[in-house]
Image (cartoon, coloured by chain):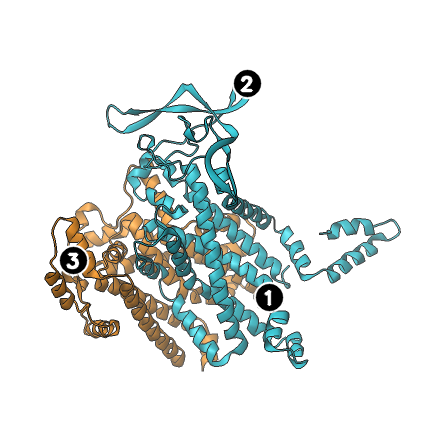
Chain colours: A orange, B cyan
Amino acid sequence: MLAYIGRRAILGIFTVWAISVLAFAIIQLPPGDYVTSYIAQMASMGSVVSDEEAQNLRIQYGLGQPIYVQYFKWMRLIIQGNFGMSMEWRRPVTEVIGERLWLTVIVSVAALILTWVLALPIGIYSAVRQYSVGDYVATFIGFIGLAVPNFLLALVLLYLGFVLFNAHIGGLFSPEFQDAEWSGARAWDLAKHLPIPAVILGLAGTAQQIRIMRANLLDELRKPYVVTARSKGLSEARVILRYPVRVALNPFASTIGYTLPYIVSGSIIVSLVLGLPTVGPLLLKALIAQDMFLAGTIVLLLGVMTVIGTLISDIVLVLIDPRIRLEET
Amino acid sequence: MAEPEAILERGGSPLGGPTAVADTREQRIFVASQWQLMWWRFRKHKVAVASAVVVASFYLIVLGADFLAYADPNASEAHRSLMPPQRVYWFDGGRLSPHVYGLKGARDPQTFKRVYVADPDRKIPIRFFAEGFEYRLFGLIPTTRHLIGVDGGADATQAVFLLGTDVQGRDLWSRLMYGTRISLTIGLFGVTVSLILGVVLGGFSGFYGGMADTIIQRTIEILRSIPTIPLWMGLAAALPRDWSVLQVYLAITIIISLLGWTELARVVRGRFLAMREEDFVVSARLVGCSQMRTIFVHMVPSFMSHIIAATTLALPAMIISETALSFLGLGLRPPAISWGVLLQQAQNVQTVAISPWLMLPAVPVIIAVMAFNFLGDGLRDAADPYGR
């Protein structure tokens, strides 16, 4: 078991490294650099940046050096916990990102938990009562969830909220808590705002998990051991929950590996539509302004977050499925 | 293609009796080719058949976008800004004569917003196969005929707006037709690139195994555990601003397929692994077939159907990716028209609340994604020889 987790951890480290290279490469791809876009920005506001000043800026940010040198410099700083300066905001990157990263984590985890909480009972119900009205309803909602891209769903809900209730359903905080210090009241306010983004982000995953759970459980329910358990007079709930559900849970847990990156991805674009104070809107702005340290840090942190989440799900998988432990040792 | 039921009827002559019926039917199944069997199984899946029709109609729109559009998709006019969709009246005094009412622009005295009022005195008849702007049908035949239009051809003073207009006064219906063309072809090209990458790398991985397999599998695992949207955003934002529409189109295709090949590679590898030890593959190798021949003549045809199904299932993701990127303003850029570009105008909830028809381009996105999903599911079930 330890060997298995160790192997996953090594893969995780490789993934983080790959993400860091990709993140850095992406930031370097556009022609020109931050200084060019800074000059353009200044020019549009009517002021001129002299060549000398531009040169000084380039030296200050180390923009003139070869790309791999810039990468190693960046990495060295990151290992020291210094993510560099945001060139656009003129403040340390960590300060600009601030609580946004944690809000991204909270929104993503909420969506993931919702996926599980909804998909598990609905999936079991759909399998046990196959072809019932409830099964068809679940299947139908599942297909909608898969077919409607989450940002469109966000848009439609936003529109309906606006037209029907004349309320803005976006955001994560009420105006009075926007910039307030953390307190019980603010956390409660956040909790009240969470369900809508969580549903939007979790729906596609939920739909998929319901289908997986249903299919797996249907396979298990036909097996002889279920008949044996039933003929021995176990209660129906025990017959189903004790063994087949546990077996069927395995692929259910193993898909968190891809559900999480999907949710994190989705949170970026949904945040833009709903105006959530996550890293999403910040990333878009940073990319457009070619604020390389900020954009690179966000992509890197999102990747690391996903890798850690996937690793946790791998460990959970080992805990609930003894077969994996046997295979690996 | 002859159907087993038809044969069944002919075979069921008074002399033959029920057993003969069963026999002929079974014989039909025994001699049927792989594709025939697939078709019979596919046909049973009603939703998949319906989806196939929907997908086919979408691609007909792709082919005939200019014929179905009735207004130049890029012709903007300020005084036609944000017109609501017009209601079509089919009858005029009991006679079939489809027409719409002309719209009068006015200012709302209280909010100062521009509003449009239908003017029942000004009937604008809709003509079929009418003259309109010039284009080349299927890119070849120059013509000015469109499915519908109004009297007066390209310089008509009055116009129809079946789905309303956008902020710049461009006709939404016509733009939607052109958007369909770009959104669906970008998906198709993207999936082709993914397919090539997936088949080559997946095949390599599954056929040779060993070190190559490990490296490719680990790469796939790494790619799959990266959140794609931030990466896409990064790559797409890196495209130079001065690139032409065509360059951006190709670049976006490559970006969405670079990360989309992993699923296809997984399917192909799985098939290769499962088949490598099959008797017919072993015997092909033993009689001295070259590796190329073993792969392309013996192995590939037997899992072609699976690849087709997996490809169909990969298409919706491509369409959604393009729509999402363009929606953010990082994908295709105007003057290119795609579903995502059209939806960009619906980004702001205040705008949408006033002009809800701007959200209409979401409808084809959802229908297309659903149709491709059902079609892919149906194909996958039909391709599985051990299915019901």
The quarter holding residue A92 reads bottom left
Instruction: Tell me the residue at 74%/50% (across/down).
Output: B5
- Judging depth in this view, the residue of B245 and B287 nearest the camera is B245
Q: Which mark is residue A33?
A: none
Q: Which amino acid lies under the numbered mark 1 shown in the image of this protein?
A: Phe
Disc 1 to disc 2, C-alpha distance: 59 Å
Task: Say what amino acid the circle numbered 2 marks.
Answer: Gly
What residue is disc 2 on? B94
Query: Is residue B12 placed above or below B298 in the rendered structure?
Result: above
> Of the residues under marks 1 and 2, which one precedes in the sequence?
2
Is residue B293 among the parts visible in the rendering?
yes
In the image, A79: left or right of A253?
A: left
Q: Residues within 10 Å of mark 2 (few under 14, many from 20)?
A: few
In depth, the one of B222 and A119 nearer the eye is: B222
Residue B303's disc number: 1
User: Where's residue A210, x and y in %?
Assistant: 47, 56
The answer to whether the residues at label 1 and label 3 have Cβ atoms under 8 Å apart is: no
Residue A45: x and y, percent? 14, 49
The residue labelled by disc 3 is A89
